[in-house]
Amino acid sequence: MSSHRALTAILAALISVNAHAIQRCELNGESVSRSNGNTTAGKSGLMRCTDEDGQVRRLDQTLRDGRYVGPVVMVLADGERREYSINERGNRDGVARTFDGKGTLRKEENLEDGTAVGVQKNFAEAGHLQELRFALVRRTVLTIGYLADGTLSELRCAPVTLVPQDRDVCGHGGRASEVTLYREAGRPSGTLSYLKGQMQRQTVLDREGRLVRSEELKEGRRIKRVYYASGQPRSETDFIERDPNSVEGREGTAREWAESGQLTQMSTWAGGYEQHIEQWYLNGQRKARQQLRREGRNQERTTESFWDNGKPAAVNQERNGRLWGWQRYFNEDGVLQREEEHGERGLLLRRKRYDARGTLEREERFLEDGSRI
């Protein structure tokens, strides 16, 4: 649905709520009706509609040969005023502005056939520029947020300079920028450094000023860390920085820690897939070790699990998320207690049970319906 048709539907809904309201429209000194196209057919000029009791109190709309094309002014019951233009396709086109009930400019958009293009601005109630964005190919590629004193509250840069305001803060002048962001005057929310629009460093602080998150680009690797309130690291990812469109995929390591400082998990990535995963108990003993392999369209996983005393607990094989081949299970002394063989679709084929000393006690075979022989 075009933005014009959507707006028309909203207006119709708002007006229908006030069924008792009477909308009066005039075009070139003649009384016309927005709901009766015959009254405006083939006519051009500025049609002005008023409704003292409706949600839309005033609507000035330009007609060209009976079609709604050109400037529009809309005034709502709370005094909000919207100014924009409609093109031949019925979509908003050109500069669109919104003013609040006090007459303060609150939003200024640049539109092409209903789509935001180029500079977009939002203003605070006090009138200062609050947010500047740049839209390109239906995406926002630059965002700069401001407080009343001109300090920055938000910053997301593009690879090239797009507006005069981004040149220094995004590092397009030849040197890396050093920017402090604020959640309110005098209260920093973090820091940023950009070089040619690429983030070099970042810190994020909570309301108490404690470090929550950090990020840095170092020797071609992007390192991201998350912290506990105590300042201890909680997680870290260390990956090679690649072009988002690269087919090589993710490569590097990811780590997680308990607040005590104990490493609890480490994952290794290559070619865009996890290759190796290790986990630890809080007492420092190894909890699990996984090896992942890809063969064609199949993904195979071998998982070694351990008791918290360091003894083996299980060895499992999976293919595409289902148990496959022989699975082995051990007691807390590390003695083999059970083996199970799984076939296609993870179906159980055979089971072997062992006594406390690891001696075979019983062996069973299973049919597709789960019955034993």
Image: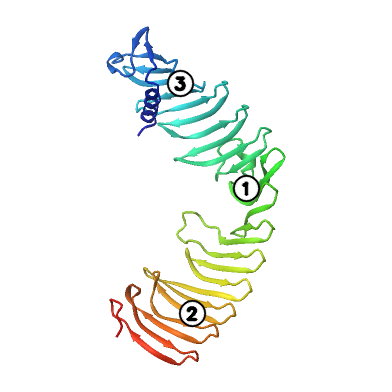
Would residue 175 be seen by someone viewing this image from the given angle? no
- Residue with the most extreme top position: 29
Vertical comparison of 192 with 255: above or below: above
Q: Mark 1: which secondary structure?
A: strand
Q: Residues within 10 Å of mark 3 (few under 14, many from 20)?
A: many
Q: Earlier in the sequence, mark 2 or mark 1?
A: 1
Q: Badge 1: how crowded within 10 Å, few (<14), some, or many (20+)?
A: many
Q: Is residue 46 left or right of residue 201?
A: left
Mark number, residue 342:
none
Residue tagged 3? 74
Q: Amino acid at mark 3?
A: Met
Quarter location, residue 340 = bottom left
Q: Which disc is residue 194 wearing? A: 1
Q: Looking at the image, tell me whether mark 3 or mark 2 is earlier in sequence order.
A: 3
In the rendered image, which quarter contains the C terminus? bottom left
Disc 2 designates what residue?
Answer: 314
Q: Secondary structure at mark 3?
A: strand
Please tell me which residue is depicted at 52% across the width and 64% down the height of the picture.
251
Q: Residue shown at 38%/25% (left/top)?
A: 87
Instruction: Tell me which residue sits at (62%, 29%) in the image.
Output: 128
Amino acid type of disc 2? Ala
- Asked if marks 3 and 2 touch (Cβ < 8 Å), the reply is no
Please name whichever residue, 321 or 332, is drawn nearer the observer in this view of the structure: 332
Secondary structure state at the residue bearing disc 2: strand
Of badges 3 and 2, the one in the foreground is: 2
> Residue 338, percent across and down?
44, 84
- Could you give the CA–CA distance between mark 3 and mark 1, rounded to whole angstroms? 41 Å
